[in-house]
Amino acid sequence: MKVLIVGGGGREHTIALKIAENPQVTQLYAAPGNGGMAALCQCVPLKATDVAGITAWAKENAIDFVVVAPDDPLCLGMVDALSEAGIPAFGPNKAAAIIEGSKVFSKNLMKKYGIPTAAYEAFTDFDAAVAYLQTAEMPIVVKADGLALGKGVLICNTREEAVQAVSSMMKDEKFGASGRSVVIEEFLTGPEVSVLAFTDGKTIKPMVSSMDHKRALDGDAGLNTGGMGTIAPNPCYTPELAERCMQEIFLPTVAAMNAEGRTFKGCLYFGLMMTPKGPKVIEYNCRFGDPETQVVLPLLKSDLLTIMQSTVNGTLAETPVEFDDGAACCVVLASGGYPVSYKSGYVISGLEAAAEDALVIHAGTKKTDEGIVTAGGRVLGVVGRCKCLPGAISKAYAAARKISFTDMHMRSDIGQRALRELEAQTK
Ligand code: AMP
Ligand code: GLY
């Protein structure tokens, strides 16, 4: 079987490693891939957003199955184009990917079907948004409607900040067309949990829960990033909360998308907050999370390709989705200056030594004649696995410290919040 993976980050490298475990896979391709994926995939120099180019290439090369991993090609309709060309593809079609592509859509969906989320108002008119802010309670959260690389969410403590946030999105078009509509929503508090779930539109099977660390610096300080590290499972997500989320959020979301004529197939990502009033949805993503995937998939015992095929064929109910009961921790090694500005092209050393006792996942890397060099903001994810979380954290950091490149930056506290939660539970 010939399988193509669309994308080139840490998430896609992790997916590739897992798919390569299936003995039916004879050849793996990645478009565009990265320096680490090049070791197990043939990398095709096409952009992940090139719907027509990738579809034509997949057809010409008789690809049997495509995994579309990033949000933008999904929202652009890559799965629709591949299906029309007769190539089965993992991921939602364009109509369903809107659950991530438009926050106004997802908030209205939750309101209509009674799925718990923060109270909100949506605006397309700047003056109406500003008028609303005059009487709204602070802090408040301002979100750009469309895709914004995870940066379109601003938490505002004062009215002035909130007006400034709305102005930057609607007037200055800081996020382009994505910010022409905005959602202004209630500020919620509580531990955050990420849950990725496979669904074929009938059955939904959640994966092991995880916790992201979005801020750039230790102690959750600094700017929001795409994610500086993750742990799984998330100790805040108790079996009782998992059952509540299944009944109040996961099943109702699948049913709501069906009722809207937008059946979702693929991986649905629930960004959840465990508030004092119960679990609420902070965001939906129409794909695997990055770097959540780096800790979730290494714990998957069942065959990933078989599960992915079952979401396309509608046979997920009969397909096992089982996880190891151990823990995993991913520490992201980033380029100094990320998420604002950084330099690339630095040679990375210590990769082999780090891989002795951890999984070294490539994100922004490139294979060159000088060796593997940095080629992005988030460069690597170093994943430690162990029976328990403290062991997974130690293994990830021990391996991460063997790697170096100019201006390398990592957080030193990935997993510490989860450890404090575990301690509190055993007291
Ligand atoms: P998002 O890009 O929607 O995941 O938002 C980024 C981060 O902003 C989330 O992980 C939360 O930490 C925070 N956030 C988003 N919405 C809210 C909210 N309504 N209340 C509090 N924090 C929020
Ligand atoms: N780690 C958050 C995301 O993938 O959106």
Image (spheres, rainbow, N blue to C red):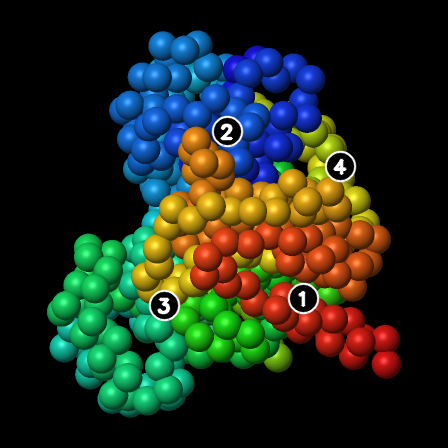
Q: Earlier in the sequence, mark 2 or mark 3?
A: 2
Which circle marks residue 301 in the picture?
A: 4
Q: Position of residue 121 (x, y in %)?
A: 32, 71
Where is residue 27? Give x, y as percent. 55, 16
Residue 183: image x %, image y %?
Answer: 31, 68
Could you tell me the amino acid type at mark 4?
Lys
Amino acid type, callout 1: Gly
Marks 3 & 1, CB-CB < 8 Å contact: no
Q: Measuring 57% from the left and 26% from the top, which residue is drawn there?
A: 40
The answer to which of marks 1 and 2 sits earlier in the sequence is 2
Secondary element at image label 3: strand
Which residue lies at the image location 26% right of the left edge and 75% below the top edge? 165
Give the Cα separation between the discs numbered 4 and 1: 23 Å
Residue on which disc 3 sits: 153
As measured in the structure, the alpha-carbon distance from the residue carrying label 2 to the one carrying label 3 is: 34 Å
Q: Secondary structure at mark 2?
A: helix
- The answer to whether residue 3 is above or below residue 202 is above
Q: Determine which residue is flagged by label 1.
A: 415
Q: Please tell me which residue is depicted at 73% across the width and 33% down the height of the picture.
A: 302
